[in-house]
């Protein structure tokens, strides 16, 4: 399985972007998809995740502004980012964890730049 992240770009503060993470094949195993980000000079952090059961969780820094979702086909996950702030500037990565086998797969990063 390969993951392809896209949707990053340059946006003004207060604006919105939607990131997508597309899997090369349908994911049927129990999994958790997470969106991570790594800002300049910072460690990579988890910002949102969704389980195959549909349960979601968010970091405090994005709660109420970001929404993680997925399609019914089990191939695409989204991160809707609203009310973007300069501190949201980062490279965003998607990571798929196959729970039963303990395997993680990462997509390549997509850069989000928020200007003031």
Image (spheres, rainbow, N blue to C red):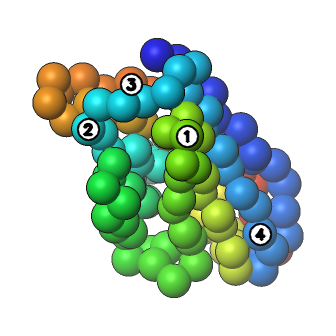
Question: Of 107 and 43, which appears nearest the observer?
Answer: 107
Task: Answer few, some or many: residues within 10 Å of disc 1's Cα (few below 14, many 20 plus, some between 14 and 19).
Answer: few
Residue 73, numbered circle: 1
Question: Of 93 and 24, which appears nearest the observer?
Answer: 24
The total of numbered circles placed on residues is 4
Mark 2 or mark 3, which has the lower sequence index? 2
Mark 1 or mark 3, which has the lower sequence index? 1
Where is the C terminus found, in terms of image quarters? bottom right
Mark 3 or mark 4, which has the lower sequence index? 4
Question: In percent of the image, x 42 and y 60: which residue is there?
Answer: 48
Return the residue at label 3.
Answer: 105
Question: In percent of the image, x 69 and y 74: which residue is there?
Answer: 82
- Label 2, label 3: how many angstroms apart (C-alpha)? 14 Å
Task: Answer few, some or many: residues within 10 Å of disc 3's Cα (few below 14, many 20 plus, some between 14 and 19).
Answer: few
Question: Of 53 and 18, which appears nearest the observer?
Answer: 53
At mark 3, the secondary structure is strand
Pointers 1 and 3 in contact (C-beta within 8 Å): no
At mark 2, the secondary structure is loop
Pointers 4 and 2 in contact (C-beta within 8 Å): no
Residue 33 percent location from the top left of the image: 40, 44
């Amino acid at each position: 399985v390969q993951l392809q992240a896209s949707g990053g770009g340059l946006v003004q503060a207060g604006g919105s972007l939607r990131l997508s993470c597309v899997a090369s094949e349908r994911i049927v195993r129990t999994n958790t998809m997470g969106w991570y980000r790594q800002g300049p000079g910072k460690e990579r952090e988890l910002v949102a995740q969704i389980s195959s059961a549909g349960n979601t969780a968010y970091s405090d820094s994005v709660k109420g502004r970001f929404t993680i979702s997925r399609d019914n086909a089990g191939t695409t996950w989204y991160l809707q980012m609203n009310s973007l702030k300069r501190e949201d500037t980062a490279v965003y990565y998607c990571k798929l964890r196959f729970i039963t086998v303990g395997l993680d797969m990462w997509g390549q990063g997509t850069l989000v730049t928020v200007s003031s």
